Amino acid sequence: MPEREPYTIAWEEETGSIIYIDQTLLPGQYRVVRCTTVEDLARAIRRLEVRGAPALGIAGAMGVALAAVRSAEPDLDRFREGVGQAADLLRGTRPTAVNLAWGIDRVVRKVAMAASVAEAKALAIAEANAVAEEDELTCRRLGTFGEELFPARCTVLTHCNAGALACRCWGTALGVIRSAVAAGKDVQVIACETRPLNQGSRLTCWELARDGIDVTLIPDSSAAYLMRKGAIDLVIVGADRITRDAVFNKIGTYMHAVAARHHGIPFYVAAPVSTFDLARTEKEITVEERDGAELAYCGDHQLAPDGVAVLNYAFDATPLDLVDAIITEIGVLRPPYAESFRLIRKGEGV
């Protein structure tokens, strides 16, 4: 994202509030929203005004800081109780993406350490800002490691939006693409539309076009055909949660991974260490189901008859045996992942 623009989400010190880009309005309208209550932030997260795993981690952290700053409770125990309730409200907005709870818990732990309400508020703001600043550094490091996987000239397929809008800035999957372009590589991007909310066409294409990166939009359903034609050299996607056995990402990711394996095309995942949930397996994760109206309608235009059942999963799970590498800020993880994941647990570089 160009330097002149504000971050996707940020803490506004002067007003003690959160500002963020409303992603539901793009690409037609660019609007920065000021959020002053936890309830408004929770609603914004549910509506996908703020979305993307790393951005949700920042939103969770800043939401707890917002609850702390806006609290008028002088008693420390009752203050903590109120902050905890706000944290629970935010935590329940998106069940699949792990970064949201990760960001929330980081700030809650700081609040628990404080000896006074004033100290708790200061610690909450500092930790929330730290989460955001670390995200930018993480994405840029991740991009540096990932671009080495790109040939000097290549066409890359990506799904959904794992760019600056999904993070503080730069991005994960798109961050790798940006880093490859910055390194002088000739990269063309094929962006899937990403039905039903079109994060690929609305957000990924918007980001890349603004950066001057060559991008072509396709229907989700044409990706396998393009692979068969030899038009795609590699696939790179982000992740909302990585368990011991699977990568959870936007619905449709799994079919791209299956098609890529069939056609001998590398399939890469780009995600920060904060997205890993190695204490769990796929079967333990709740996959979010969203309102059927997202499929049955396009804006105000009705696409399906009244009364038709709709199944609208927001995410799917891709088994790790379909993933050729996972790009992180500590390096590129490769199979066998049981061994690579030990480095994550130890916090070591690859």
Image (cartoon, grey):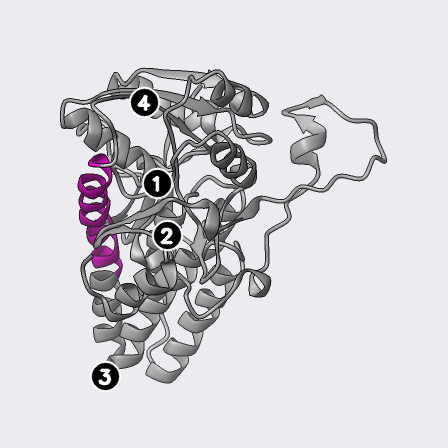
Q: Which comes before the other along the chain, label 1 or label 3?
A: 1
Q: What label does residue 208 carry, if any?
A: 4
From the image, state whether disc 3 or disc 2 is nearer to you: 2
**Amino acid at dot 3:** Ala
Q: Amino acid at mark 4?
A: Leu
Quadrant the N terminus occupies: top left
Q: Secondary structure at mark 2?
A: helix
Find residue 115 and name its label.
Answer: 3
The reply to whether the C-beta atoms of the residues labelled 4 and 2 are less than 8 Å apart is: no
The structure residue drawn at horizontal position 49% and vertical position 53%, both measured from the top left corner, is: 42
Dot 3 falls on a residue whose secondary structure is loop
Q: Position of residue 243 (x, y in %)?
A: 45, 60
Q: Earlier in the sequence, mark 4 or mark 1?
A: 1
According to the picture, the residue beneath numbered tag 2 turns out to be: 59
Label 1 CA crowd tier, 10 Å (few <14, some 14–19, many 20+): many
In the visual, does 238 lie left or right of 286?
Answer: left
Quadrant in which the C terminus appears: bottom left
Q: Position of residue 210 (x, y in %)?
A: 29, 19
Q: Residue at x 31, y 74 (%)?
A: 109
Which portion, as a residue range, is magenta?
Answer: 128-148
Q: CA distance from mark 4 to mark 1?
A: 19 Å
Number of marks in the rendered image: 4
Q: Residues within 10 Å of mark 3 (few under 14, many from 20)?
A: few
